Image: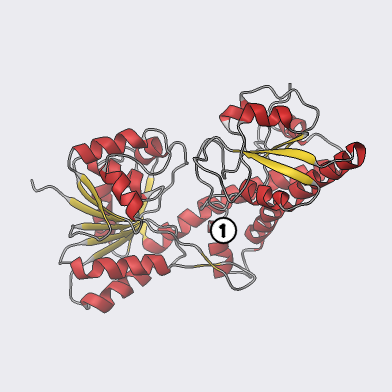
Amino acid sequence: MEQQRVCIMGLGYIGLPTATMFANSGVRVFGVDVRKEAVDTINSGKAHIIEPDLDSAVRSAVVSGNLTADLEPKEAEFYILCVPTPFKEEGDIPEPDISYVLQSADTVAPLLKDGDTIIVESTSPVGTTEAVEKQVRAHVGPDMKLFFAYCPERVLPGKIMSELIHNDRIVGGLSPEGAANASRIYRTFVKAQILETNAQTAEMVKLTENSYRDLNIAFANELSLIADRVNVNVWELIELANHHPRVNILQPGCGVGGHCIAVDPWFIVSMVPDLARLIHTARIVNDGKPDFVINQVQTAAQSFQERNGRKATVACLGLAFKPDVDDFRESPALMITERLNGLPEMEVIAVEPYATEAVSGLKMGDYESTIESADIVVGLVKHSQFAGASIRRPDLIDFCGLKRV
């Protein structure tokens, strides 16, 4: 049987792990990225991002000869688009920008032949897969026999390599044949269910999943604001409420970050702003939490300065968007630390174990010496290094549930 070939456009947090899964399952994979540094790193057998087990998977895939990276696509039978879908800047309600997806479609179009399948993995608004087909047809015409499908990722950073295999996948085709083709190629490594539907439903499923999570986080974050106002410990409040057999409240944080939960709900809101009222409100609550955090820290720093006649040294623990990852996309912790760093009443030192270099011009410090010298410690991200340690300080301002001793 002839070896199947897959061309993956975009070798980031989803594209690279997906490429290694295919390659280590016997598929010939051509990975494409616009960053030469990423391409060179991958071809040397290393990962350019931090994710448990990814480095060894890349090494195996490259050594086997099944994975090569390049700046340009190569001919294949399957083309998978894993490029970013950022916001457009203008307007009160952020709108998705699918220009990178459409550019990827433009790029692969000259290589297409009868029988090929184009799969969109990028998180996208409803109708994106149809837009990709229209973009491709503008190059190849209406008569070439092509198949189109949408298959969103559903993985958790820090567990991507396991969840790619063991999480159910949703595959939506613009035709039943498109869904079947996409299912067939993903079955080379997916051990869980692959559920087929149409492309529009699959696109909406991805947005719905992350909007649901955003709503639940917003409830916890709103509780933290209310608890502070009425002088109640929010951590004890949630712990006790969760003893109810049908209550499972999440833990509050300093906001919501990452390229999924902080982004995807806006895709729904921008599509139907008159109907998505609850989803919109959740976004407002979560996007507003950093302001609360900054006000709390600023008040503590001003009080310290009044008592001691000097600026407070403030240690900000964590810059990533979630614990134990090196991903800073849409990170509220990073945004909070940057804004605090610009205030005159404090000197800020950032502690981030997953930063390989200084971030955003911030002064960086190691964990032990920084919290020892700091006047105020601010818990923003519950990295294992922080959560497993004993912080014996009355001046810890905890926004992520660090353990007090």
Q: Which residue is at the front of the view, 162 or 87?
A: 87
**Does residue 130 appear to the left or right of 220 in the view shown?**
left
Q: Quarter of the image holding residue 268? A: bottom right
At label 1, the amino acid type is: Pro
Most extreme residue toward the front is 310
Q: Quarter of the image holding residue 80? A: bottom left
Viewport quadrant of the C terminus? top right
Disc 1 secondary structure class = helix
Q: Quarter of the image holding residue 265? A: bottom right
Q: How is the image coloured?
A: secondary structure
Q: Please state the horizontal and vertical placement of residue 188, each as a whole percent of the image.
A: 24, 42
Residue at left 47%, top 41%?
157
Label 1 Cα neighbours within 10 Å, binned few <14 / some 14-19 / many ≥20: many
**Does residue 269 appear to the left or right of 168 in the view shown?**
right
**Does residue 63 appear to the left or right of 236 in the view shown?**
left
Most extreme residue toward the left is 1
Residue at left 84%, top 36%?
232
Task: Give the residue number, with chain letter if any, for mark 1.
Answer: 265
Q: Please state the horizontal and vertical placement of residue 137, each as a whole percent of the image.
A: 26, 75
Q: Which residue is at the front of the view, 137 or 145?
A: 137
Viewport quadrant of the N terminus? top left
Residue 187 makes an appearance in the image: no
Q: Please state the horizontal and vertical placement of residue 160, each as a whole percent of the image.
A: 41, 39
Q: Please state the horizontal and vertical placement of residue 237, each as a whole percent of the image.
A: 77, 33
Residue 12 makes an appearance in the image: yes
All told, the count of numbered labels is 1
**Does residue 321 appear to the left or right of 9 in the view shown?**
right
Q: Which residue is at the front of the view, 319 or 402?
A: 319
Residue at left 57%, top 29%?
384
